[in-house]
Image (cartoon, coloured by chain):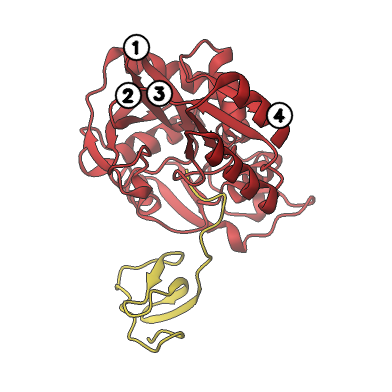
Chain colours: A yellow, B red
Amino acid sequence: MNCSECDANLNIPDDASVGEIVSCPDCGADFEISKKEGSNVELKQAESVGEDWGE
Amino acid sequence: MSKICIVFDRLRLEEKLLQKEAKDLGNETSVLDAKITQINTDSKKSDFDFGDVVLERCVSYFRGLHFTACLEFLDVPVINEFNVANNCGNKLFMSLLLKKNNIPTPKTYFSFSKDGAMENVDKVGFPLVIKPVIGSWGRGVMQIKDKDTLDAVIEIRELTDGPHDRIYYLQELINRPPRDIRVISVGGRAIAAMYRKSDGGFKTNIALGAEPELCEITSEMEDLVEKASKAMGGGILGVDLMEDEKRGLLVHEVNNTVEFKGLVKVAKKNIPKEMIEFAVNSIRK
């Protein structure tokens, strides 16, 4: 699967779960795994860090 | 066997560790993305797979707080409870509760307009630390050493003009070693602690690069953590302490949805296990 921003190859670990963030190694764009069924993975653009994020 | 549901908006190592530990302890688990969950005033608990208890673990404070309100509306037991999240999520509410419960905490000044803040500073003098009432990871926390810095901070707040920008939370600058102590509290018990060492600045947030180092829990820490937890309403918390040169330990912050990915590698106790056991025991009560 390639990055929708810069077309670099995205390395998605086999044990990654829905909701995890994958970062593009080239451009740094963040994607959230929105669906995962076996080797079929769907990504969506991750939310940017919000003012209220934290502990 | 119990069923534990982890509500998240960004699945981090913490949520995966909690899920793994829950399974290892023989429980069922489910994970639910708050971002894609819809609840309405006619919703019933049975419409969802919330299990016996929910661990609310959203990274977005407001999302988690409002989701928790919905869970309590549905009579779903949730850790932490709405009141706890509300108390910890707002530094002004938290400071008031700490002081009200006689827990040593830095002296903090509140004002409700820029003019009020400037008048307050005129009385108190510099240096002070300004913090946004809502926010984490050290964002917006600044040392105010002189009037020029104060004027700049106030001007920025006037420009951004968010609803909380008009609430000014100014705190005395504590004379302390360049570190603070984060203690993880589970049901009022201090289960693990670490020093967070500054990387040169005065902030000691791990999110900003502070170095974690294991800290031995003293009986004084246990006592303060138990009191701070009780003041906030219990649950699973991160209690932050500073070592004041004259007054000893001060509680300066209590955090909801505590992060523990750094501490889990060095802690003697199994942090996610303690949290899951607490959640399971809360069902039985």
Q: In this image, B152 relative to B179: left or right?
A: right
Tell me the CA gap for discs 2 and 1: 9 Å
The spot of residue B87 in percent (x, y) is: 59, 30
Label whose residue precedes the other's in the sequence (1 or 3): 3
Q: Residues within 10 Å of mark 2 (few under 14, many from 20)?
A: some
Q: Nearest the camera: B239 or B123?
A: B123
Q: Name the chain letter of the residue that bears numbered label 1.
A: B
Q: Nearest the camera: B13 or B111?
A: B111
Which amino acid lies under the numbered mark 1 shown in the image of this protein? Lys
Disc 1 secondary structure class: loop
Q: Which residue in the structure is indicated by mark 3?
A: B174
Q: Name the chain letter of the residue that bears numbered label 4.
A: B
Label 3 close to label 4 by CB (< 8 Å): no
Q: Name the chain letter of the residue that bears numbered label 2.
A: B
Which amino acid lies under the numbered mark 2 shown in the image of this protein? Arg
For discs 4 and 2, the disc positioned in front in the rendered view = 4
The spot of residue B236 in percent (x, y) is: 45, 33
Disc 4 secondary structure class: helix
Which residue does the image show at 38% across and 25% down from the upper left?
A: B241
Label whose residue precedes the other's in the sequence (3 or 4): 4
Q: Nearest the camera: B51 or A28?
A: A28
- Quarter of the image that includes the N terminus of chain A: bottom left
Tell me the CA gap for discs 3 and 2: 6 Å
Q: Which residue in the structure is indicated by mark 2?
A: B176
Q: Residues within 10 Å of mark 1 (few under 14, many from 20)?
A: few
